[in-house]
Image (cartoon, rainbow, N blue to C red):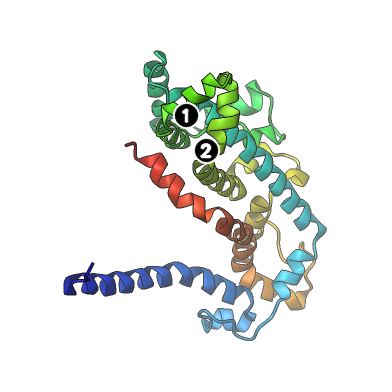
Amino acid sequence: MKETASYKVFQIFNGVIMTLVVIATLFPFLYLIAQSFSSEAAVYAGKVSIFPVEFTTKTYEIILSKPDFFRYYWNTIVYAVVGTTISVLATAILAYPLSKDRLRLNKIFIPFVLFTMYFGGGLIPNYILVAKTLGMRDTIWAIIIPGAISAFNVILMKTFFANIPSEVEEAAKVDGLDVYGIFIRIIMPLSKPILATMVLFVIVGIWNNWFGPSLYLQSKEKWPVALYLRQIIDSAISPTEMGATSETASQIAATVKSTAMVLTSLPIICIYPFVQKYFVQGMMIGSVKG
């Protein structure tokens, strides 16, 4: 096909817009990285843009030298792995039967799922339920179980399952598979795009979650790294308490926010390229039925 002049103009215009979007997206993160590696004087003087000024790694050295930091990081990894596994499996188990129009009770259950997207019990009832009624305070389950199933994720996965041809399941039945065998051996392998999308959604949510742990975790050794770094940002943990000398305390105070954000975001940024090829496909198929 021959490209028309208007189409070439559109390509140029689209390229310019996308370039501006990329710059606007990358600039804040590049600025944080540059600030975290810059000196105290440069930060306070406002000289830092996207490149470090008077390069230094003092803040990273102080934070990473604390044994507690790696314990908090390990806690976060455990919460993320266990929580993501439970959340994705539970969401798939709920979404699969809801995708079958032949099940009569779907007309009852689907409105209940949608209801939870708009209405919640509130902070105090949720706290009483998790901490008092279920007795999960100061445990890993208080962080994982309450948010294990998201109505939005259920709807996405339900729509994806509904787009899988019914002939695939009928052929599996002819081969002797029951409902559980079809789900485990046929449906789940065919659902890699939406599963990867769900993994990304859930793991980002758990990794960045500090509010739930601040409510339910009483033992400091069970904190995730996001809560620990937030405490640093809020100055609940001063540079001196972190082990810094008076010479480096002011440097840490100047760059600790940007350093904390970089350390929190880096693992998720490293994970994204491995699921990116499934992410767009899963979002498109899971959001539009047809």
Q: Quadrant of residue 188?
A: top right
Query: Which of the two marks, 1 or 2, is nearer to us in this view?
Result: 1
Q: Residues within 10 Å of mark 1 (few under 14, many from 20)?
A: few
Q: Earlier in the sequence, mark 1 or mark 2?
A: 1
Q: Residues within 10 Å of mark 2 (few under 14, many from 20)?
A: some
Q: Quadrant of residue 240?
A: bottom right
Report the front residue among 82 and 5: 5
Instruction: Name the kind of residue labelled 1 in the image.
Output: Val
Is residue 234 something that shows in the picture? no
Instruction: Label 1: state its secondary structure.
Output: helix
Instruction: Label 2: state its secondary structure.
Output: helix
Report the front residue among 171 and 13: 171
Instruction: Name the kind of residue labelled 2 in the image.
Output: Leu
In screen coordinates, is 198 left or right of 260? left
How far from the left and from the top, in percent, is residue 212?
60, 40
**Number of numbered discs visible in the structure rendering:** 2
For disc 1, the marked residue is 168
Residue under the point 56% across and 49% down: 204
Residue under the point 78% across and 52% down: 71
- Image quarter in which the N terminus is found: bottom left
The image's mark for residue 190 is: 2
How far from the left and from the top, in percent, is residue 5?
17, 75
How far from the left and from the top, in percent, is residue 101?
38, 20
Alpha carbon of mark 1 to alpha carbon of mark 2: how far? 10 Å
Q: Quadrant of residue 12?
A: bottom left
Q: Is residue 70 above or below residue 216?
A: below
